[in-house]
Image (cartoon, helix red, strand yellow):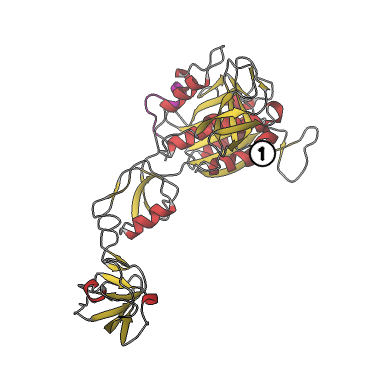
Amino acid sequence: MTAVPATGSHHDAARDAGVGSNARVPLADYLAGVLRGLRPLPPLDLEITAAHGNVLAEDVVGPGPVPAFDHAAIDGYAARFDDVSDAQPGRPVRLSVVGDLVASSWRPVRLTPGTCFSVAAGALMPVSADVVVPPGMTDQGMAAVEVYHPTKRGHGVRRAGDELPAGAILARAGAYVTPPLVSVLAASGIGHVVVRPSPRVVVIATGDELVDVGRASQPGQVVDANSHALTAAAAEAGAHAYRVGICDDDPEGLRGLLDDQMLRADLIITTGGTGTGPGDMVRRILSRTVVFSDLSVYPCSSLGYGTVGGQNGVPIVCLPGDPGAALIGFEVLARPVIQLLAGADPVFRPSVRAHLLETVSSPSGMREFRPAYITERRGGGYTVAPLAGGPYTLSGLAEANGLMVLGEKVISAAAGSTVDVILLDRRR
């Protein structure tokens, strides 16, 4: 169930962004070219519980009213308002209790003047009853009840269609299926909805030097932090994420692994091997269908994007091997791709403007994404404190709830100035 290219191939879309040239490509141009070549995954009919977290592919119209019938909203006595409107503490109204109704009662009953039914919340209202008197306003009698206080007409009653009339649009295409929406759908009698499926994302770490977690790095061996982190990041973005693990710098091994994963993946993410050094195998092996770009982005200046498995094959994102740079690369490229495949709109995280608490410097000509901690001020607005960036981006991200964005022309941002901050709220 791979994404459908808009026009041409994913490889062409990357080229359209200007990648492959000697000059560094502005991020906005690059993303526009990549995302323009993608379409959301084909829609799928799912049971409403299974659809939770997915994006609706079409409007959902309620087949009937909510509530479906008039019922008691509280426990009490279903009565006629005209019978209890004159009740006073010193002059109670006495009614005969002619029966009990519970939520499972289904047979219609009718009230006559001077009578009432003892009802439980959810019970079908008797015909001609237009009020439910709470027990605390009565002597709580069983065969007969005395009402000491008047109530307003309609008190304790929910009428059919009070919340949603028949034919109401319950949710628009593009909305996320949330737990409350699942409840509304179920209450409306809807068991299935048409959604965009969550993308299946496969994560592969490459490199002869990589070893699995549970040991410390040492010369010649580096613990694979990336595949674990990126799998978690993909899951946080709403994907069904699968960590394949470590692939050595073996061309045939990588080709075979990619061939194996194409049938289960809507997107493949690799990490490592995107540079031009002697050990950078990924760039050499995939360069026919993946375009590797030098971007004006710091600390992730090299990204690969294209397809595997033919022109209309599975899209692939190639991220660098440095853990901090890989996570930034995921945020700027892989996450928007996942969101677009899932049918989300917008595909980017929300951002705000915030007042900088301390002066920071930034590389000239690069758009820096720097970990930061953002705080909402009591009187309105936000403040942001920069955290460790550059070679220490990974530790900075572990503390961050935002990414401070410093443009290509920014060499220094003074304390008190206003900067853009992407909100990392750990939700889609």
* Circle 1: element type: helix
Residue 209: percent from left, percent from top: 73, 33
State which quadrant residue 183 falls in: bottom left
State which quadrant residue 109 falls in: bottom left
Residue 310: percent from left, percent from top: 45, 29
State left or right for residue 10 relative to residue 109. right
Foreground of the two, 193 or 403: 403
Reading the image, the residue beneath label 1 is 399
The answer, for residue 220, to whether it is visible in the render is: yes
* Residue positioned 41% across, 54% down in the render: 180
The kind of residue on which mark 1 rests is: Glu
Q: Residue furthest top?
A: 22
Q: Which residues are magenta?
A: 4-13
Q: Is residue 5 magenta?
A: yes
As drawn, 291 above or below 197: above
State left or right for residue 182 relative to residue 216. left
Foreground of the two, 263 or 133: 133
